[in-house]
Image: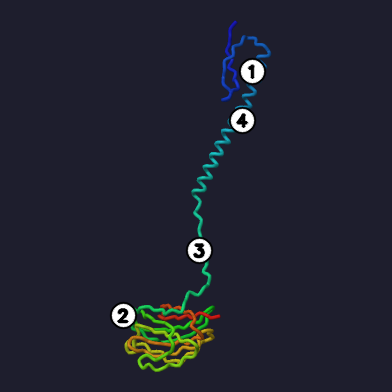
Amino acid sequence: MARHGLRVPRAGAGGCDAVAVKRRTSLPAGAVLAAAVLLTGCAQQQPSTASSSGAASSSASAGSSSSAGSSSAPPAVTTAPAADGAFPADTAPDTAEASADARVTVTDIRTGRHDGFDRVVLEVEGTGTPGWDVRYVDAASSQGSGEPVAVAGDAVLQVTVTGAGYPYDTGAEEYASADPLPGEGTRTVTEVVFDATYEGTTVAFVGTRSEAPFRVYLLEDPSRLVVEVADQP
């Protein structure tokens, strides 16, 4: 009687391996039942293996996507902390050089009150960039003559503008308003006394209630020297 070879999968450590099973035309019922059980077992195992492979693939894909997403994310932006509002000033002399072509005339003087400090502004006209020498002095005296100058307050802040010129040099009219100029709502500044222009410098005296910290800087359009005096407790 002819023999036929039937390939029946076998469950093994590496999955279901195909093995040859020799059978006659009529196989015992037990053998057929065993083969059916093995086939059923392999049918259940193979999807599980495929599912595991798919899960691993999905996990790898997800990991790859996550990694790609992380690498393409923009870097964190760090915002600098806000200023604490402290007044950056002291009582040491403050000086700055005038430009070589400076020839300016003080045309206006103003005082004002701001949060935490008083402001004195000396507006100038002319050419070049003025310099300055601002410092506390023991007593005010007029430049040129040396005569004492009366200034209200317990301390005197002398403001010297360098690179100054006479009105006939600059074509600008020199300050000739209130003298002394009282502080407008100020807390530390008492008044400003304009002195004179002499040999390239113009002097004004700022009376204060104490030797409070101050700062000096220059603004443009129009050009003006700014002196700010901090409040005292």
Residue contact between numbered discs 1 and 4, judged by CB atoms under 8 Å: no
- The quadrant of the picture occupied by the N terminus is top right
Q: Local crowd at mark 4 within 10 Å, few (<14), some, or many (≥20)? A: few
- Residue type at mark 4 is Ser
Residue closer to the observer: 221 or 185: 185
- Please tell me which of labels 2 and 3 falls first in the chain: 3
Residue contact between numbered discs 2 and 3, judged by CB atoms under 8 Å: no
Q: Local crowd at mark 1 within 10 Å, few (<14), some, or many (≥20)? A: some
Q: Residue furthest top?
A: 1
Of tags 1 and 2, which is closer to the observer? 2
Secondary element type, mark 2: loop
- Residue type at mark 3 is Ala
User: Image check: 107 left or right of 54?
Assistant: left
Q: Which residue is mark 2?
A: 101
Q: Local crowd at mark 2 within 10 Å, few (<14), some, or many (≥20)? A: few
Residue contact between numbered discs 4 and 2, judged by CB atoms under 8 Å: no
Of tags 3 and 4, which is closer to the observer? 3
- Residue type at mark 2 is Asp
Cα gap from disc 4 to disc 2, whole angstroms: 91 Å
Secondary element type, mark 4: helix
Secondary element type, mark 1: helix
